[in-house]
Image (tube, rainbow, N blue to C red):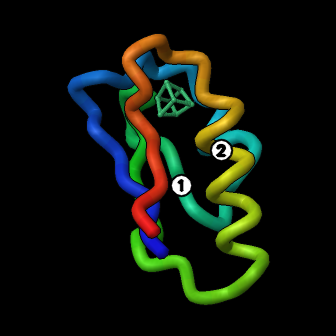
Amino acid sequence: MKIKLDLAKCTRSGECYYNHPMLFKADKEGWPIQLKEELETADEQLEARQAVEACPAELRPLWIEE
Ligand code: SF4
């Protein structure tokens, strides 16, 4: 399972890196940087699903690939 991020659709709201530092961090301008793409553990997979669900951007910049 992978989590994917399309920065062109991101609004820099910050939920992903504030709430899921296992998977994301912020760059100097507040854009998210992915720390992991391949999700190996159950914890990572749960965090990723929560991050996708909580992302408020209408264009859906985060998604899961099974
Ligand atoms: S939660 Fe969504 S919109 Fe907000 S910074 Fe992360 S990817 Fe971008």
Above or below residue 3? Residue 40 is: below
Q: Residue at x 65, y 44 (%)?
A: 51
Q: Quadrant of residue 15?
A: top right
Judged from the image, the secondary structure of the residue bearing numbered disc 1 is strand
List the single residue furthest toward the left.
8
In this image, 18 relative to 8: left or right?
Answer: right
Identify residue type, mark 2: Ala
Identify residue type, mark 1: Phe
Q: Which quarter of the rendering shows the C terminus?
A: bottom left
In this image, 47 relative to 8: left or right?
Answer: right
List the single residue furthest toward the top.
58
List the single residue furthest toward the front.
66
User: Ligand 1 within 8 A of label 2's CB?
Assistant: yes
Label ID, residue 32: none
Q: Position of residue 58 (x, y in %)?
A: 47, 11
Q: Position of residue 39 (x, y in %)?
A: 54, 78
Above or below residue 12? Residue 28 is: below
Name the residue beneath numbered marker 2.
51
In this image, 65 relative to 13: left or right?
Answer: left
Q: Position of residue 4 (x, y in %)?
A: 37, 54
User: Ligand 1 within 8 A of label 1's CB?
Assistant: yes
Name the residue beneath numbered marker 1.
24
> Pointer 1 and pointer 2: residues touching (CB < 8 Å)?
yes
